[in-house]
Each structure stands twice: as structure tokens, then as C-alpha cells.
Image (spheres, rainbow, N blue to C red):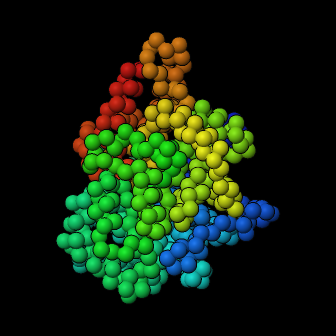
């Protein structure tokens, strides 16, 4: 990139484009982060004690699915920068690292194994997950589990999960008919798994079925954020696999059984970090210094049965901000819960698509940039750039803003109108988003605005 263009990005547009765009402008390499050695919050991390075994776990956990990468290849982890992030997280007291078989195309386990190698094994907790979605046989299951230990360069996993349970039929096939659950229970007895649990994206029937099994579940990984907690899950789940449990229902069921919770997606796929202007205004009026993400983290961190809150931190600024939020945790007060309810209501009034940018649906065989389109749509929804009618007084401005940005953000061949509704992406989405339907809706929207 020409120096002139780069300078322009860094100055006028740089802040708005964010570090990701800046990274690609600099040749697709994430800028080397700097370390703030004078930060007084270092050393003040809040820890939760696992009531079952006394593990002292940092309330902020490192989700290992969003390390910085080199270029657009999400499997090419930028190991130099990621190691700096891991080291800084540890310096700030983070001791829980959550990876999984499919993260970064299989490279997350390899990287985090290398990154943690220099630390004593008893100084961190490593979590990984069995790839339910691959539907392995018993023999394949054995191979996968041993491969995971090898990739992570460890003798045991501290926390190990049946990954992304979302279908009762699939659960029965993999864990009952193929007897993978028996095998994992044997590994727990053998000391290769210290805590056995599951991560969940399904309906109430599946939740209750798995919970009722004759297994001493040690913990669960579930999605909790203040918007879903207050208003229940969004319409994305309508008609999909029966009734979807809301976060509070799951939390109460687990608390009753004294099963600790690890929280994923506390920011609702980043949406609560970029709250709508109205919601952000409500939060700011109460705590002017706090960004919206801090409210979301404080909310889930204040729930007593939560062991740790995962965040996939790509940039040093996110890591530092999140670590400060929990160093120490300032729990939400009763009056702040009312503020959050008002902000949640404002968020819900703006329709956004609950895509978490996990990229499980990628690559789309027809080249559609699924997370890119959803991210762009959500940005426009929050900035009021989606006109509802041509009679809208703001129609012309919003129309132009939507179309100009859309063509810039998503290349023509990757836009929603190129989706042929093959439906291959549907079973891959843990958020159960009806992707082809949303693509059709966005394609119609952009067509009507042109
Ligand atoms: S339904 Fe559309 S977005 Fe999904 S895989 Fe098929 S073409 Fe891609
Ligand atoms: S559409 Fe679903 S699978 Fe694809 S990135 Fe978003 S949340 Fe992940």
C-alpha cells in the first residue's frame, strides 16, 4: 500500500476502520502490540473457586478461536503476535484457555499447546472439546482424543467438553450408539480428563436429556449475555428444533445441581460491544467512563455460579480492556440491573442477526461471505442505515450509506444475491441462523435500494 494511503487510513479513517483494516493495510500482519508495564490493575484479577475441586480460575478466560491471523486465511495463526497476547494474558492473571478441534482449521490446539509449553503445567487450566459435528465412530473417537492431547502437548485436559450439542439424534448417535461418551468417561477415570462437561446450542429437550444422564457432569459451557437473560432468546430460534431454553432457565437448572458454568458469547458475537446508539447512550449516562462491553462482562461475571467468562481476544486493546474489567470485578448493582434492562430493550428494538463470526459455516461453496454480510448488516442496523420505507424522511441518506458501504465491504461475487439457497451452511451454524433466508432478505433489501 502506498504510504500516502496508509497515512490517510491511520489518521482520518483509521480509527473508524479499526485494527483489522489497519492490519490488512499493513500487509495483512497484525501490528506488534505494546505492553503497558505501569498498569495498576495488573495483579488484581478476580478468581472463582470451583466448588467441586478447588481450582482457582480467573474470571476472564481466553477463548482460542480468534487469534490474529496472517492475511485472510483464518487457519494461519500469527504465532508471534498471538504468543505476545497469551503471555500478556498470563501476566494479567488469566489462567483458563479454551480451545477446540475445529478452531482455526485445527491449528488452535497446536498453537496454544506451543504457547503454554513454557509455563508449568499446574499454572494454567486447558480446556478442549470433542468434535461432535464430525460424528466419529468409537475408533475414530479414540484417535481424535489422543491426537488432541498430542497437538496440545499435554498429558491431560483440565476441562473437556462434548462440543456444540445441538441435536438429540446426533448426541444419541455419537455418544450413545458409537459409545464415545463411555470412552470419555474412561479417560476421566484414567486422569486424562479432570472435568467433563459439554457446550450447548440446542433445545430444552436435548438439554434436559443430557443433563439427566447418569453422568457426573462437572461443568457446562453455555451462552449467556444480558440481552438474552432479560428478554429470552431471539426469534432466530423460531421453529428450530423445538423450544430453545433461555440463559436464565439453564443457569437456574445448573445452579440447582451445583454445576459450575463457563460462559461463552458474553457479548453476543460482539454485538453488545457495539451497542446501538440508543443503548450505548443509556449505559453511558450511568457510567460515562465504561464502554458497552464492560457492562456486558460485568453482568455475566456477577452471576455467582459462573466460573469463568470466555472472550476470544484478537487485539491487545481488547485483552487489556477485558482484563481490567475483571481486575477486580466490580459487580453490577440492583440499580444497574435496571439500566441494563433499559439498554437491552433498546438493543432488541433494533433487529440484528445473531452471527458470532465463528466462521463454522465457511467457506460457503458458492463464495458467499456469510459472516462479512451479517456483520455489515448489523452495523447498518445499529447506525440506522436500513430505511424501512421510501417515505422515511431519512431514506435517501440511509439508502446511499447502506449501498456504498455494502459494495465496499463485500465484493460483488460474495454478496447475498449470489446465495443459491443450497442450505449446506444451515447445520453448521451453532446459532441456528436460517442463513439462506437471511441472505434472501438482505439480497431483496439491497435490490430494493438500488
Ligand atoms: S445456502 Fe447460500 S450461503 Fe449457505 S452455503 Fe448455500 S450458497 Fe452458501
Ligand atoms: S452464520 Fe453462524 S456459523 Fe456462520 S459465522 Fe455466523 S454464527 Fe458462525
Identified at 47% across, 71% down, the residue is 127
As drawn, the residue found furthest toward the front would be: 256
Note whether 328 is above or below 51 in the view shown.
Answer: above
Residue 352's image quarter? top left
Residue 215 x, y percent position in the rendering: 33, 74
Residue 410 x, y percent position in the rendering: 45, 37
Note whether 355 is above or below 105 in the view shown.
Answer: above
Left or right, 241 with respect to 198, comes to left
Residue 389 x, y percent position in the rendering: 43, 17
Residue 140's image quarter? bottom left
Asked if one can make out residue 126 in the rendered structure from this viewpoint, the answer is yes
Identified at 60% across, 45% down, the residue is 337
Identified at 59% across, 63% down, the residue is 60
Identified at 39% across, 72% down, the residue is 217
Asked if one can make out residue 313 in the rendered structure from this viewpoint, the answer is no
6 or 66: which is nearer to us? 66
Amino acid at each position: 500500500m502506498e504510504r500516502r494511503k496508509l497515512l490517510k487510513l491511520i489518521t482520518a479513517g483509521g480509527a473508524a476502520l479499526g485494527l483489522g483494516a489497519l492490519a490488512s493495510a499493513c500487509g495483512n500482519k497484525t501490528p506488534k502490540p505494546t505492553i503497558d508495564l505501569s498498569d495498576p490493575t495488573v495483579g488484581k484479577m478476580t478468581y472463582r473457586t470451583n466448588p467441586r475441586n478447588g481450582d482457582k480460575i480467573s474470571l476472564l478466560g481466553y477463548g482460542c478461536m480468534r487469534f490474529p491471523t496472517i492475511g485472510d486465511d483464518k487457519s494461519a495463526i500469527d504465532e508471534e503476535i498471538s504468543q505476545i497476547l497469551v503471555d500478556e494474558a498470563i501476566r494479567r492473571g488469566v489462567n483458563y484457555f479454551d480451545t477446540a478441534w475445529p478452531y482455526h482449521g485445527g491449528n488452535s490446539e497446536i498453537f496454544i499447546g506451543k504457547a503454554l509449553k513454557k509455563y508449568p503445567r499446574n499454572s494454567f487450566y486447558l480446556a478442549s472439546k470433542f468434535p461432535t459435528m464430525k460424528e466419529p465412530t468409537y475408533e475414530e473417537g479414540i484417535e481424535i482424543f489422543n491426537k488432541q492431547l498430542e497437538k496440545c502437548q499435554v498429558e491431560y485436559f483440565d476441562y473437556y467438553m462434548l462440543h456444540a450439542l445441538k441435536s438429540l439424534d446426533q448426541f444419541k448417535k455419537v455418544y450413545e450408539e458409537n459409545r464415545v461418551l463411555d470412552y470419555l468417561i474412561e479417560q476421566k477415570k484414567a486422569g486424562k480428563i479432570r472435568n467433563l462437561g459439554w457446550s450447548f446450542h440446542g433445545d430444552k429437550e436435548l438439554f434436559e436429556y443430557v443433563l439427566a444422564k447418569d453422568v457426573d457432569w462437572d461443568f457446562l459451557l453455555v451462552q449467556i449475555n444480558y440481552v438474552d437473560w432479560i428478554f429470552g432468546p431471539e426469534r432466530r430460534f423460531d421453529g428450530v428444533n423445538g423450544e430453545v431454553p433461555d440463559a436464565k432457565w439453564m443457569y437456574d437448572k445448573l445452579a440447582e445441581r451445583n454445576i459450575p458454568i463457563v460462559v461463552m458469547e458474553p457479548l453476543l458475537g460482539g454485538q453488545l460491544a457495539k451497542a446501538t446508539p440508543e443503548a450505548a447512550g443509556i449505559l453511558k449516562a450511568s457510567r460515562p467512563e465504561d464502554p458497552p462491553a464492560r457492562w456486558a462482562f460485568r453482568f455475566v461475571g456477577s452471576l455467582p455460579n459462573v466460573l469463568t467468562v470466555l472472550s476470544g481476544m484478537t487485539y491487545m486493546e481488547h485483552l487489556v480492556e477485558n482484563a481490567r474489567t475483571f481486575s477486580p470485578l466490580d459487580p453490577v448493582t440492583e440499580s444497574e440491573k435496571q439500566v441494563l434492562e433499559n439498554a437491552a430493550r433498546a438493543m432488541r428494538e433494533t433487529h440484528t442477526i445473531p452471527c458470532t463470526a465463528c466462521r463454522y459455516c465457511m467457506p460457503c461453496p458458492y463464495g458467499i461471505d456469510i459472516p462479512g454480510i451479517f456483520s455489515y448488516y448489523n452495523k447498518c442496523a445499529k447506525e440506522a442505515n436500513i430505511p424501512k420505507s421510501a417515505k422515511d424522511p431519512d431514506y435517501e441518506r440511509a439508502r446511499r450509506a447502506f449501498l456504498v458501504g455494502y459494495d465496499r465491504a463485500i465484493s460483488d461475487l460474495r454478496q447475498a444475491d449470489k446465495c443459491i439457497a443450497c442450505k449446506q451452511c444451515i447445520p453448521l451454524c451453532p446459532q441456528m441462523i436460517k442463513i439462506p433466508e437471511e441472505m434472501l432478505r438482505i439480497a431483496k433489501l439491497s435490490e430494493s435500494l438500488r
